[in-house]
Amino acid sequence: MNDPHETFEPEKLRDRLTEKYADLTSSRALHVAWYGMGDNPYFSVGLPDLCGFAGHLEALQRPGWTVKLTILTNRRAMVADQLVELRKIPVPFELKEWSLAEEEELLKKSHISFLPVCAQNFSVVKSLNRAVTALCHGTQVFSPGFDLYDRLDDFIYQRAAPLNDAIDSGQFRLRDETILKLEEVFADCADPAAEARRLMAFLQEREEHRIAASPIGLAPEASPDPSCALICGRDTNATAYRLAKRTGILTIASPGTPVTANFDIRFEWNDTFTGLNLLISEAVCARLADEIAGKARPCGRIIETTYRKLSMLDLPSLACPGGGAAWTGSRAAALATYPVEYATMRAAMAEILPKVECISDENWRWPFSYVRQTARLN
């Protein structure tokens, strides 16, 4: 799904383009905007991209023309090392803290939005939203580097030379005569109604596929899809749990998971802390092999789910050697028994539902190297 524009008003855009060109020719001052998140905890993007491609702005600073760059970004990105790099930008600039109101005001007065894109993995899959926003506000888009905005190619400058030619001639790629073309391009990749229809069609198709795939024709909530399961830890992301429920993924509570929600499967310590008990919902129990399902005994209801229970006498893989410390309930004991808990849960799942892929979700802030090595954490 593409990021759609908020508002696209061709008549207002036409007026704004006229005003901006009149201001440009009278002032001979080229107002350039760079706006967005200036940092990222995992990737060197934002202000590093601006600094890395800033040399392209120097080519716009020709005799008779003045370039004025305004940088809008988040305060967190304004660290000392980055400010030192900003000083190397070859054109005069003003640095401001980003806000939606500041961005709106900046785009109203700017002639060019400078949106460089580096070719690292994170950058090449970003959305078109900044270029779409810039074009809706009547600014030309100068985007050197990776061609992220290829779907908007007719309105994007990747080199300074063609942009300088347009400044001299007034024949910009975004101008009165090309607004209709822009409207057609937006209809394909940035129209809110079209994107909403695509999303609804996708969700409808997915729902129909899941219902058709169910052997008894029930929706995922009534009969979870057994191809994947989410093992919830001591501190699981609520969004991950809700997503699993909505998409028919089995939900599994580990021994330390708070008993505050419905789960398809629950693991809990037995009375002697020598192994785990396995509580399986009636819906999931119906999917087990007869040999295993026949051993599962009714054990009552937790919240809104009725369960059947298997012990390590029924399923030897539920034995937990070294799990005895769990009875203390201390954090140290929980840490000590955590690896054996996960190993036991995975072994039991492999035995009762061998075709199910288990994914773990844990946000408990302890160095669980075992889980990192054996599970895909979200």
Image (spheres, helix red, strand yellow):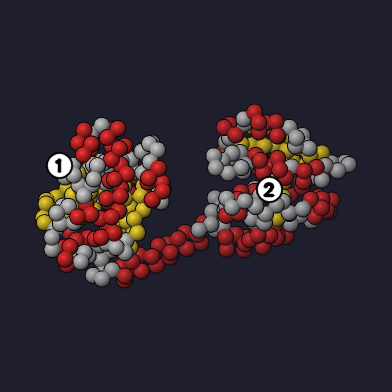
Q: Is residue 195 above or below residue 47?
A: below
- Name which residue type carries label 2: Pro
Q: Position of residue 239 (x, y in %)?
A: 37, 47
> How many labels, in total?
2
Specify the amino acid type for callout 1. Thr
Q: Residues within 10 Å of mark 1 (few under 14, many from 20)?
A: few
Residue 103 in sight = no
Q: Which residue is mark 2?
A: 116
* Apparent side of residue 127 relative to residue 23 in the rendered image (left or right): left
Q: Which numbered tag is attached to residue 131? A: none
Q: Where on the picture, by quarter, is residue 179?
A: bottom right
Mark 1 lies on residue = 272
Along the line of sight, the residue nearer the viewer: 358 or 136: 358
Q: Residue at x 28, y 55 (%)?
A: 347
Instruction: Give the residue drawn at x 14%, y 42%.
Output: 271
Picture coordinates of residue 212, whole percent (x, y): 31, 71
Q: Is residue 258 above or below residue 78?
A: below
Nearest the camera: 51 or 62?
51
Residue sitting at 64 percent across and 28 percent down?
A: 80
Left or right of 373, for residue 332: left
* Coordinates of residue 121 in the picture (x, y in percent): 59, 52
Disc 2 to disc 1: CB gap under 8 Å: no
- Mark toward the viewer: 2 or 1: 1
List x then y, in percent, for residue 164. Answer: 82, 50
23 on left or right of 208: right
